[in-house]
Image (cartoon, helix red, strand yellow):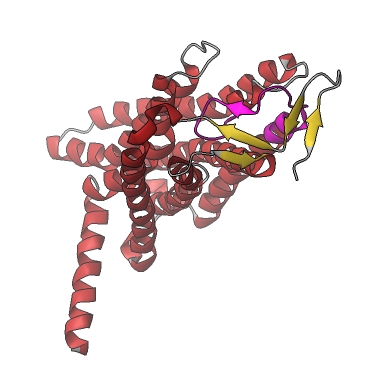
Amino acid sequence: MTSSQSDPGGNHTLSDVFVLVGFSYLNELQLLLFLVLLVIYLLTLMGNLLVILLIKLNSSLHTPMYFFLVNLSASEICFTSSVVPQLLGHLLVEEKTISIAACAAGVYVFAIMGLTDCCLLAAMAYDRYVAICHPLHYTTIMSSRVCALLSGASWAAGMLVGVPLTTWLFSLPLCGSNRIQHFFCDILPVLKIACADTSQIKAVGPMVIVLFTLCPFLLILLSYVRIISTILKVPSVEGRRKAFSACSSHLTVVTVFYGTALITYLVPNTGSTTESDLLLSLLNTIVSPALNPIIYTLRNNEVKGALRKTVQKSSFSHHWRN
């Protein structure tokens, strides 16, 4: 039995499930997409869990930068897991339905983790700024207490913005068609089926999102302007190379994260979800989280060294037991 939700005028009803149209247009190619996304999702989980494990097991990585990286990896796992498992299931079935409660839960997690990622990347940029521009005071400024406060503030900011915004969205009466032209529940596609006056949330929502996504981005830019200015003053080529190397992984992650997010959410809205919009959303929700652990393991000498040390220690332990 399904319940229904009526609009104030009583002209439309909406069952208690949504239909996520998503990639239905691919027909038999949906199985191929399932296999590709399954591999990427498993690599994302294993990569981020590996980064967390390496940092926990190697005392040489117990520094502020890697403390924030553990938080970022945990957030990325939650971020992509709010979308991908459901998408994988829908690619295998004809009836791509999701309950309103599950849809709301997905939007909550997606919004919270997305905003948390922005703040964590800003905290990591500040850490790099202090390390390069104020190296003599680094341990004093980036104390364990300060790191805990910055990390906690990042998670709190995500919840303080994501929870009220999502609650406001799902407090609106939803009516008309229950078909969402997307492969997951996102704020804008759900907003399109609201039958109340959405002018306030359309005005306030983007302003809040811009404030809590672009402000961290501007802080990152400001940090790197100061960092680059300081690096260019280093007299030796080797000194400049080491300083740039210390920032390269974080800067690459920021470029990938904000590049896909800005293209996805700040391109002109045509009012309908196109195939290119779906592909851009895939980049933002699936490909970007998969690249982060790869970037931090392939471009970071400290992480690569910790990985080799862990593998050697594991091999030695196994050989000794045998």
Query: Would residue 133 be seen by someone viewing this image from the given angle?
Result: no
> What residue span does the magenta drawing correspond to?
165-186
Residue 184 highlighted magenta (yes or no): yes
In front of the other: 16 or 232: 16
Q: Position of residue 13 (x, y in %)?
A: 77, 27
**Left or right: 104 in relation to 250:** right
Residue visible at 27% across and 38% down? Answer: 248
Residue visible at 22% across and 88% down? Answer: 321
Query: Would residue 216 be seen by someone viewing this image from the given angle?
Result: yes
Against 293, is 167 above or below?
Answer: above
- Corner quadrant of residue 10: top right
Q: Position of residue 180 (x, y in %)?
A: 58, 27
**Left or right: 214 in relation to 57:** right
In front of the other: 146 or 5: 5
Residue visible at 35% across and 68% down? Answer: 57
- Corner quadrant of residue 159: top right
Q: Position of residue 94 (x, y in %)?
A: 49, 39
Against 124, is 64 above or below?
Answer: below
Q: Position of residue 183 (x, y in %)?
A: 49, 33
